[in-house]
Image (cartoon, rainbow, N blue to C red):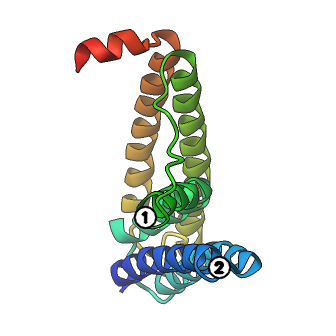
C-alpha cells in the first residue's frame, strides 16, 4: 500500500507542477500557480500521515516505509529546485524561451555542487528525523532494522556526496579542460 502511495505522491507532485506551469503561462494566473506550487508539500504531509498510520496499525517496518521518509526529505529539500527546473523546461519547450542556465565551470561549478550537497544534507536531516521518529513510534513492537539500515546506507551516500561535491571546489575544471575532454 505504501509503495502505491509513494508512486501516487510522485505523480501528484508532477501533476501539481504541470498545472501550476500551465496556469502561470497559458492562463496568466500567477497567484493560482503559486497556490498550486505551494500545495506540493501537502502531498508529503499526506504521505507521512498514511505511513505513520500504516505502521501504527501493525504493519511491519519495511524498506518502503524508509523510502517514504527519504521521499519526503528529498521532496522538501529539493522541491523548489525541481519546480525551477520544470519552469525552465516548460518555457524552453512550449514557449520557445531559451533561458537555460549556462554550463558552469571552475569555482561557480564548485559552489553549485556544494549547494547541492547542503540540500542533500537538509533532505537527510528531514528523512533521518522521520526514520528515527518511525522507530520510536513503533516502540520495538516490530522489527525496525530496515529503518536503521536505510539510515546507515544513506549516511554513507551523504558522505560520498560530500567528498564528490568538495572535489569540485578543491579541483575546479576550466572550460578549456572540459572542451578537451569532449
Q: Residues within 10 Å of mark 2 (few under 14, many from 20)?
A: many
The foreground one among 146 and 98 is 98
Measured from the top left, where is residue 85 in percent x and y?
51, 54
Q: Is label 2 in a helix, a strand or a loop? A: helix
Q: Nearer the viewer, residue 179 or 72?
A: 179
Q: What percent of the width, then of the height, locates residue 94?
A: 44, 67
Check disc 1: other Cα within 10 Å, few if <14, some if 14-19, many if 20+.
many
Name the element at disc 1: helix
Q: Residue at x 58, y 83 (%)?
A: 46
User: Which percent across, then down, holds residue 3?
Assistant: 34, 78
In the image, is 22 to the left or to the right of 67? right
**Can residue 145 be seen at all in this image of the molecule?**
yes
Q: State which quadrant residue 77 falls in.
A: bottom right
Quick one: label 1 or label 2, which is nearer the N terminus? 2
Q: Residue furthest bottom?
A: 57
Q: Quadrant of the N terminus?
A: bottom left
Evaluate whether residue 62 shows in this view: no
Q: Nearer the viewer, residue 90 or 41?
A: 90
For image coordinates 41% across by 78% down, the residue present is 11
Q: Is residue 32 left or right of residue 50?
A: right
In front of the other: 125 or 85 = 85
Residue at the image point whose x is 45% and y is 23% from the top: 163
- Disc 1 and disc 2: Cα gap in Å? 27 Å
Above or below for 39 versus 87 = below
Q: Which mark is residue 36?
A: 2
What is the quadrant of the C terminus in the image? top left
Identify the residue at the far right of this view. 31
Residue appearing at x 49%, y 49% in the figure: 98
**Residue tagged 1:** 66
Amino acid at each position: 500500500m505504501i509503495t502505491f502511495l509513494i508512486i501516487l505522491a510522485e505523480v501528484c507532485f508532477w501533476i501539481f507542477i504541470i498545472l501550476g506551469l500551465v496556469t502561470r503561462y497559458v492562463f496568466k494566473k500567477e497567484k493560482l500557480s503559486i497556490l498550486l506550487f505551494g500545495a506540493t508539500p501537502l502531498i508529503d504531509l499526506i504521505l507521512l500521515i498514511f505511513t505513520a498510520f500504516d505502521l501504527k496499525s501493525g504493519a511491519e517496518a519495511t524498506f518502503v516505509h524508509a523510502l517514504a521518509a527519504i521521499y519526503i526529505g528529498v521532496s522538501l529539500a529539493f522541491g523548489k529546485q525541481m519546480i525551477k527546473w520544470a519552469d525552465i523546461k516548460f518555457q524552453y519547450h512550449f514557449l520557445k524561451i531559451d533561458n537555460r542556465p549556462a554550463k558552469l565551470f571552475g569555482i561557480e561549478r564548485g559552489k553549485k555542487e556544494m549547494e547541492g550537497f547542503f540540500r542533500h544534507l537538509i533532505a537527510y536531516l528531514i528523512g533521518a528525523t522521520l526514520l528515527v521518529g518511525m522507530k520510536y513510534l513503533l516502540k520495538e513492537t516490530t522489527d525496525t532494522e530496515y529503518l536503521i539500515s536505510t539510515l546507515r546506507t544513506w549516511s554513507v551516500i551523504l558522505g560520498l556526496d560530500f567528498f564528490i561535491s568538495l572535489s569540485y571546489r578543491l579541483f575546479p575544471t576550466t572550460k578549456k579542460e572540459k572542451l578537451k575532454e569532449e
